[in-house]
Amino acid sequence: MDASGEACRATWGSRLGFVLAAAGSAVGLGAVWKFPYVVGQHGGGAFLVIYLGCVLTLGVALLLAEMTVGRLTGQSITTALRTLGGRAWAWVGRIATFNAFAILSFYVVVGGWTVTYLMRAFTGSVLANDTQRLVAEFSAFTANPVASLASMGVFLGLTALIVAAGVQKGIERAGKWLMPALFLLMLLVIARALTLPGAMAGVAWFLTPDFSIISGDTLLEALGLAFFSLSLGAGMIVVYGSYLPRDARLAGSAVWVATLATLACCLAGLMILPAVFAFGVPPDAGPGLTFITMPAIFAQMPFGHAIAIAFFLLLLFAALTSAVSLFEPVAAFLIDEYQWRRSTAVLAVFVATFLFGAPAALSFGIWSDVRLFDRTIFDLMDYVTVNLLMPAGGLCIAIFVGTSIWPKARTVLEGSRAQWFVPVWRVLLLVLTPIAIFGVWYQTF
């Protein structure tokens, strides 16, 4: 037994469990909630092309890099970077861990929305053909400080319980059963959404690129969303990689995680955006888009009440897998760096996250007029963490793996069928990643 009170470093029960848990970071709210409205704000098809390009190049390379750091040490990001690179690199890990905490703090606000909408689905009050009514009800709920903070607290508590249960009994078990069910239900809802009058206009808008509308902000959002949907740059994949057994095939796992994340985002687009056009809701309606369009679809489906319950239940669990991937690196930091027991670390993260997340929750209501750099508190937390700090963290990991520990890093692919990827991987880490990130920042600022 070690100083943290645990018998040994936990491991995933199977490679499938790891892939589903890691992909769950995107398959949850990253895909169903954020992807459709960000696509809606940035022109549809052109944004989709840029996003896919980021995921399938930089995304795979950085997933593999973060998995490698975790697998080589069996430690969370701060401790791992200190072990492999010395004290200076440990600061990169601390910043990444804080970023995961900051993302979790605004993410649980949206997670709380799923709790409330699940309750409304059970009563049937969530179903309505009138999208104006749905918009008004969503706005009224998010503006209510008591309801917003209470729902956030419930969701955060559920997240804490899963993390407290450990890796195999909590995190892995949740991802292994619930993610496949969500995919199946998404396909069912897509089948209905595509039959709505006017839905094909949404499909065309989503899949047809118009590169004339691309700007520096569009590139930054696409890059940031790629990092967000793959959980890059904030230590989540390093921690998940630290629980991998030594014989796990990292290259294949990285490709599978990227593939499932991309598939989830594309399915979410096909599920939400055709309905947006069918019901005349602006595609740039913002963070509440999913909670406005989905109830309108369910209201027109056979057995819509039951399907609404199933959808918001599974959306809640999908959101939990994402929140868990953000919660776990912060708890692991306290366990690895300060030898806290898991239960103590989980409680500390729960309290700190609630206090730090409260201003984000209130920014939809009584603090909606509080703006910094022309953004609400929620929007500013989202923008800084996802669009700035996550790419910065990914850039640091790319340089670290491609230079400081390259002789060790390349060994994870040697002797495998993916050995051909070794030189390509280094080029992606040391050439394409810095060019993409600095280029996008330059265009933006």
Image: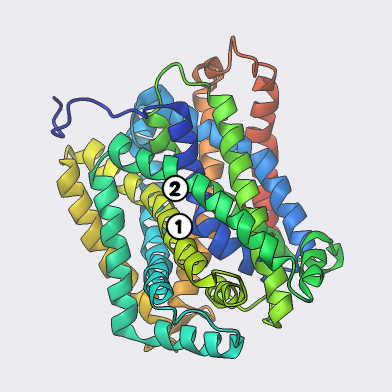
Label 1: element kind: helix
> Residue extending furthest front?
302
In which quarter of the view is residue 443 placed? bottom right
Of labels 1 and 2, earlier in sequence is: 2
Q: Is residue 402 left or right of residue 204?
A: left
- Closer-to-camera residue (97/190): 190
Residue corresponding to mark 2: 178
Label 2: element kind: helix
Residue corresponding to mark 1: 314
Q: Is residue 435 visible?
A: yes
Residue 389 pos. (x, y %): 50, 55
Q: Amino acid at mark 2?
A: Leu
Rendered view: 345 above or below 119: above
Residue 373 pos. (x, y %): 52, 78
Q: Residue at x 53, y 29 (%)?
A: 401
Rendered view: 137 above or below 153: below
Disc 1 vs disc 2: Cβ atoms closer than 8 Å? yes
Q: Residue at x 52, y 41 (%)?
A: 396
> Residue extending furthest top?
415
Q: CA–CA distance between discs 1 and 2?
A: 7 Å
Q: Is residue 2 left or right of residue 220?
A: left
Residue 332 pos. (x, y %): 29, 41
Rendered view: 202 above or below 74: below
Q: Amino acid at mark 1?
A: Leu
Q: Residue at x 41, y 48 (%)?
A: 96
Image quadrant containing the N terminus: top left
The chosen color scheme is rainbow
Image quadrant containing the C terminus: bottom right
For label 2, count other residues whose C-alpha is less than 10 Å away and answer few (under 14), some (14-19) or many (20+).
some
- Closer-to-camera residue (202/356): 202
Residue 104 pos. (x, y %): 38, 59
Q: Residue at x 22, y 50 (%)?
A: 346
